[in-house]
Image (spheres, grey):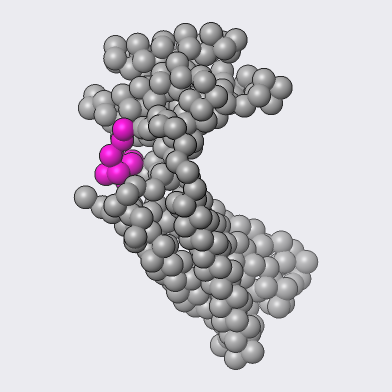
Amino acid sequence: MANRGEMFAKEVDLAASRAHGPEERDLEIIVNEHASRGMATSGANIQTRHERRWRTVAELLAFRLRLEQETPLLAEDETSWYERLVACIDRIVGQEQDRLLHALDQDYRRFVGGPLSDSWRGQVLREFEALRSQYLKEAEIRRDRRALEAKMPKPPTGITLNISQSSIANLNLGSQVGQIQSVVGGLHEKGLQEIAAAIKELTESIVSEARLADTPKREAVEMVSAISEEIAKPQAERRTSVLRMASNVLWEIVKHVDKLAAAYELVKAAARSQGIELP
């Protein structure tokens, strides 16, 4: 069974593999735009391509911190989560630094006809060190905040999703499950126990349902996440179009499994009691 840090590392690797495709398409667009202006061999072309790759690096680091913030911390991870977060930040920075330096050198050879200059290489290394320091500082802030929260009086017992870490890891649903847990806990604290319990039951039933393949199971949990987020909003901020779309997609997935269809109907009934109509 993967631990919390290993699960997050897999999610970051998956996010990186998904990000590189759109990045490559954007890089070609940048080349074509500069070529149309007769600037294909200019430093501006190389700089713009570097900045596009840099955006991917920043997105991956922000994604890792978001996973840490949104996913509930288990007791078994309390003594190790910070070291694993720091290790993951170092790994992302190291891998992406090597990737960007290699890509920048290739761009220099392709568009200028020579190797990457020492001055630009040094600048990139300084940029990565500054970025690493920034995210390590954010990790320290998160550590200090958790230490402070641990000293505060515990709130009354709430409601917790009963989903194994291995299931979350296998389906790459760390952020979605964390978001649903946050919403369910918030609804419970507001006294809306019925709808909180209904969303909890539906989520747990979907994840544990053996008759659902991983892809529809993942999509169903994503729809529950979208629905629960809208339900938790004040009426004036609630987007009925999102509720309708997500509910329709969810129903098409669960309607053929009696247990899941019944769990969805419970969510509908609980939402209706709060003046929220789901299709």
Q: Nearer the viewer, residue 7 or 162?
A: 162
Task: Mark yes or no: residue 233 visible.
Answer: yes
Q: Which residues are magenta?
A: 162-171
Up the image or down, 4 lies above or below 118; here it is above
Q: Residue at 44%, 32% (x, y): give it.
A: 156
Up the image or down, 65 lies above or below 271; here it is below
By secondary structure, the bulk of the magenta-drawn segment is best described as: helix
* Residue 173, magenta (yes or no): no
The single residue placed furthest to the bottom in the displayed view is 118
Looking at the image, residue 279 sits to the left or right of residue 173; the answer is: right
The image quadrant of residue 114 is: bottom right
Up the image or down, 173 lies above or below 68; here it is above
Q: Position of residue 158 (x, y in %)?
A: 42, 30
Q: Position of residue 150 (x, y in %)?
A: 45, 51
Q: Nearer the viewer, residue 164 or 92?
A: 164
Q: Position of residue 250 (x, y in %)?
A: 44, 21
